[in-house]
Structure formats: structure tokens, C-alpha cells
């Protein structure tokens, strides 16, 4: 079965703290894609990163970094030196690339609500 | 360039009425997706269009839900005889192509539907 689990429902940190959002996935496919989206209070889902299953190299983009580990089926997201503007709900999503998902639909986790306080 | 747009942004309707939600994808994007976001169910896939055809309708919750896409561009999601459990935010996304390439989906601002 395909499933994405974000065990942390809510996280609250103080500005400048580092914070890691966890994502664990289950899939039948050997080829798949993982995504992170941010949903600020305005409501629109904003794309952050896309990673395919053959690329386990970690990625850093400014204060954001992602750790992809196939051995533990995890794709965790770290924000370094958090800021108030990082407050949002963050979603991890999976898209299988095999015959089970020829359209590319996304399976989302339940989301983690991050609150960064000044 | 312009992103995905959706209209209306908010819709309040009475139980039993029909509603139409519109999505205008990013220009040049051939794939279009509808999702629903509700408190109880999170973000759920509804339907996928490639061009004007819908190869994957597996997420439509009942036969009261239908969608069409014309000219490979604008899509309309129709909910007939609305029920209170249909209250949710309906999100549209588009990508350059659909299918196995798994291109990134870009989302619109959503339509917040409230059924009284």
C-alpha cells in the first residue's frame, strides 16, 4: 500500500531554533517521487522540493535541507535558524511512478503545523 | 507567469443544490489534477486529466461528483445535490505533463466550499 506518515501534528519553536519535520513513506514501487509542500495561512500550497527514488543525495537550499534515506523510507526536512515567516503547515507527498499510478497523483501525509514564535 | 487560478474563492450553498468549481491551469500545462482538503480526511486526490481525457477518476467519492476539461485548458468540477460532508477546500493543480514523468504539480489557491 502507498502511505505517507507525518507523525508530528504540531511543532512549536522559538525563532532561530533549528527544526526537523519527519516524513515516513510506504510504497509498492521501486521508482517513485517524493515532495514537500508548504501551506502558509493564506492557504495556497507552495512547492518546495521534488526528489526521485534513485537520488539519495541530500539537498540544501538556503536554510532548508532534506535528508532522504531509502533504508528507513524517510524523507525528513530541516529548517535551520527558523524564522516567523516559516510558520505554516508542511506536507510531505509521494507519487509512485509505476503501473499503479500512471497519472502521477500525489498521496499526502497529514501535515505538520509549524509555529515559529519571535 | 500566471499561476493556477480557481474560482470562486469561496462558495456557500444549501444542501441539495449543485455547484460548479472552475480551474484555470498554468498556460502550457497539459496535466490537471483536482484534490480535496478537509479536516477529517486531509488532502485527497479526486481526478486527473491529461489533455481533455481523464485516465484516473479513482478519487471521486461518489457519482454526484464529475469533472470535465475542455480545450485542454480550463476544468470544471461539478458536485450535484451537495451534502454537508462535501464542505472542504477544493484544490486544483497542474503540471507540464502527467503520467510516469511525475512532473511537479503547482497548486491554485483553492475554492472553499461550505454546504449549509
Image: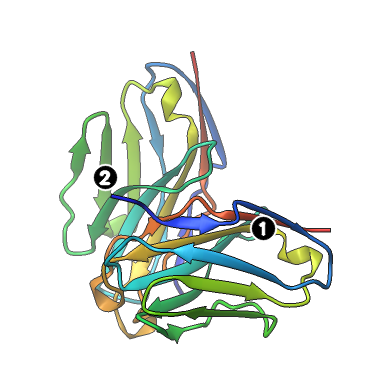
The residue at the point 30 percent across, 80 percent down is A98
Q: Residue at x 36, y 67 (%)?
A: A95
A63 up-or-down from B65: above or below:
above
Residue A22 figure quarter: top left
Residue at position x 79%, y 71% from top? B17
Mark nearer the viewer, 2 or 1: 1
Q: Residues within 10 Å of mark 2 (few under 14, many from 20)?
A: some
Depth order, front residue of A2/B15: B15
- Looking at the rendered image, the quarter that the C terminus of chain B falls into is bottom right
User: Which secondary structure, mark 1?
Assistant: strand
Residue linked to disc 1: B88
Q: Relative to residue A51, is residue B19 depicted above or below?
A: below
Q: Chain of mark 2?
A: A
What label does residue A67 carry, if any?
A: 2
Q: In x, y percent, where is residue B91?
A: 52, 59
Left or right of A106? Residue B103 is: left
Q: Nearer the viewer, residue B10 or A106?
A: B10
Q: Residue at x 30, y 63 (%)?
A: B27
The residue carrying pointer 1 sits among few (fewer than 14), some (14 to 19) or many (20 or more) residues within 10 Å by Cα, namely many
Q: Secondary structure at mark 2?
A: strand
- Taking depth in this image into account, of B92 and A96 the one nearest to the observer is B92
Using the image, name the chain to which the residue with label 1 belongs: B
Check the image and name the residue furthest to the front: B71
Q: Tell whether label 1 touches label 2 (CB within 8 Å).
A: no
Q: Are marks 2 and 1 on the same chain?
A: no
Q: Which mark is residue B22?
A: none
Image location (x, y in percent) of residue A99: 33, 85
**Horizontal arrangement in the rendering, residue B77 relative to residue A97 (left or right):** right
Outermost residue, top direction?
A: A118
Placement of B67 over or under B112, stated as above or below: below
Amino acid at each position: 500500500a502507498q502511505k505517507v506518515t507525518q507523525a508530528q501534528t504540531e511543532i512549536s519553536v522559538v525563532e532561530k531554533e533549528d527544526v526537523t519535520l519527519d516524513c515516513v513513506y510506504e510504497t509498492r514501487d521501486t521508482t517513485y517521487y517524493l515532495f514537500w509542500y508548504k501551506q502558509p495561512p493564506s492557504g495556497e500550497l507552495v512547492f518546495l522540493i521534488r526528489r526521485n527514488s534513485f537520488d539519495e543525495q541530500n539537498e540544501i537550499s538556503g536554510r532548508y535541507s532534506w535528508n532522504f534515506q531509502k533504508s528507513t523510507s524517510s524523507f525528513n526536512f530541516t529548517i535551520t535558524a527558523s524564522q516567523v515567516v516559516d510558520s505554516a503547515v508542511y506536507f510531505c507527498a509521494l507519487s509512485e511512478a509505476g503501473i499503479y499510478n500512471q497519472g502521477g497523483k500525489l498521496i499526502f501525509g497529514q501535515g505538520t503545523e509549524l509555529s515559529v514564535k519571535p | 507567469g500566471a499561476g493556477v487560478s480557481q474560482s470562486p474563492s469561496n462558495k456557500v450553498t444549501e444542501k441539495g443544490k449543485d455547484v460548479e468549481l472552475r480551474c484555470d491551469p498554468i498556460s502550457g500545462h497539459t496535466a490537471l489534477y483536482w484534490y480535496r482538503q478537509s479536516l477529517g480526511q486531509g488532502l485527497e486526490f479526486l481526478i486527473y486529466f491529461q489533455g481533455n481525457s481523464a485516465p484516473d477518476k479513482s478519487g471521486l467519492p461518489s457519482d454526484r461528483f464529475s469533472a470535465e476539461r475542455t480545450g485542454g485548458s480550463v476544468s470544471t468540477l461539478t458536485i450535484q445535490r451537495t451534502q454537508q460532508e462535501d464542505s472542504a477546500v477544493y484544490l486544483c493543480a497542474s503540471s507540464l505533463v502527467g503520467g510516469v514523468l511525475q512532473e511537479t504539480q503547482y497548486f491554485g489557491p483553492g475554492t472553499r466550499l461550505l454546504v449549509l
